[in-house]
Image (cartoon, coloured by chain):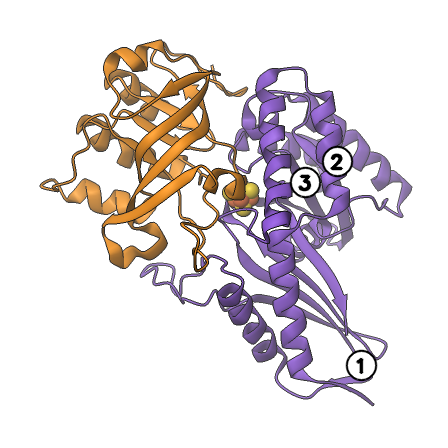
Chain colours: A purple, B orange
Amino acid sequence: MRTVSAEKLTKAVKDSLIKINYELDNSLVTLLKKAKSKETSNLSKSILDDILENQALARDRKAPLCQDTGVAVIFVEHGLDVRLDGNLDDAINAGVRLAYDEGYLRKSVVQHPFNRENTKDNTPAIIHTKLVDGDQIKLKIASKGAGSENMSKVVMLTPSDGIEGVKKLVLDTIFDAGGKPCPPIIVGIGVGGNFEKSAMLAKEAILRDLDDSNPDPSLNALEKELLSEINALGVGPMGVGGETTCLAVKINTFPMHIASLPVAINIQCHSARHMEVTL
Amino acid sequence: MIRITPPIDNATIKQLHAGDKVLLSGTILTARDQAHIRLVKDQATDLDLKGAVIYYVGPTPARPGEIIGASGPTSSYRMDSLSVPLMERGVKMMIGKGNRSKAFRNAMIENNAVYMIATGGAGALLSSKIKSVRVIKYEDLGTEAVHALEVEDFPCFVAYDVHGKSIFKGDV
Ligand code: SF4
């Protein structure tokens, strides 16, 4: 059986977290540039200019893009034929600790919902582990800010609400969020499963590649349709009105109970910081 | 483009209209959730808020040799009710991101103050407009302590003006 050292995993987590906090993904930058060329008002153009200038500056200076460097969210796909020579959660948290310290990232995690005492090293990370075939460990690593996370929701619709109910919920949620989640946003939608499964689906949806297409043709069409309907809301960059509110919609689904239609909407701001590494 | 240097008076507030781009230079204060709670409780504070500008920000730590880390705005709505007593004590301008409650807007107009937004997520860019930083209150709050920032040409936009207009698509 293959062995991966915990030290190597810690370093991968650390390096990835620092990198994503300094550099926006190229496909995202391309979408932001395209969005800017579509804006007609000076105000919305000026905001997209700031966002583009900001990412160039952050990349050049190796500095954080945003002051909210988020909570670390890590999806682990652990092959059954590979063994980590240490505790997985500990190795991940060690990487988080190092990244937020050495990368000069903000420590935004508090220990307790009511005493609000900062843990001072941005741990614990939120870790989701899945066992899969193979001899590799795949990590999807994200820093998720609160501005957009706070505008996300899970709603238990009923089957009769159908596709129209889902669309209405998405549009209402985004319109009501306005400028708070730092639009232009990316919207991850989880439909199906149950209460917690839908939230997981939505979170995984925002981690999908921006330029992938949904393998299910009907969902692929729905993603495109929702994208144009969201943009027709006119919320615009930072909520000031404009052509682009949303850069991409990603929908993930799962089978569900005959009586249920759970829907989760996870909003991701334009500072979409995530990447994948395989060990 | 309008240039403003705090402290801010009523005449300046009146000239500002939703959507105007403003470049701020001079001293502005930082405060977010925890600092607001303390400032509101701490009636006898020695902090002079007359004509003051409050920026809702909690920066990333500065690297050695740097003045400050990334310094973009945080969502303002969490400070809505706490802003009111501070405006009553003289705060004239608040900078954050996103829309705010009707009650906040009414209190803002009553107190002749203005709400500004800076581009959210532009932490690296906005920090390049900050020339010096000093902790002036509640040091134990770390990134959430009240800091005095010296800024130069700090870019922001008028979001709610005293004439009742809003920059936001969703507002009436
Ligand atoms: S919503 Fe995103 S871009 Fe906006 S402040 Fe939060 S982390 Fe930064």
> Badge 2 is on which residue?
A31
Per the image, label 3 sits on a secondary structure element best described as strand
Is residue A275 visible in the rendered image? The answer is yes
Is residue A151 visible in the rendered image? The answer is no
Q: At 29% across and 56% down in the image, what residue appears?
A: B141
Q: Residues within 10 Å of mark 3 (few under 14, many from 20)?
A: many
The residue at label 3 has a CB less than 8 Å from ligand 1: no
Image x and y of residue A199, in percent = 64, 53
| Mark with earlier residue (3, 1) | 1
Residues A122 and A202: in front is A122
Residue type at the position of mark 3: Ile
Q: CA distance from mark 1 to mark 2?
A: 38 Å
Q: Residues within 10 Å of mark 2 (few under 14, many from 20)?
A: some
> Badge 1 is on which residue?
A80
Chain of the residue on which disc 1 is drawn: A
Per the image, label 1 sits on a secondary structure element best described as loop
> Badge 3 is on which residue?
A186
Q: At 48% across and 40% down in the image, what residue appears?
A: B128
Chain of the residue on which disc 3 is drawn: A
Q: Nearer the viewer, mark 1 or mark 2?
A: 2
Q: Nearer the viewer, mark 3 or mark 1?
A: 3
Residue B7, by quadrant, is top left
Q: Give yes or no for contact between labels 3 and 1 (Cβ–Cβ under 8 Å).
A: no
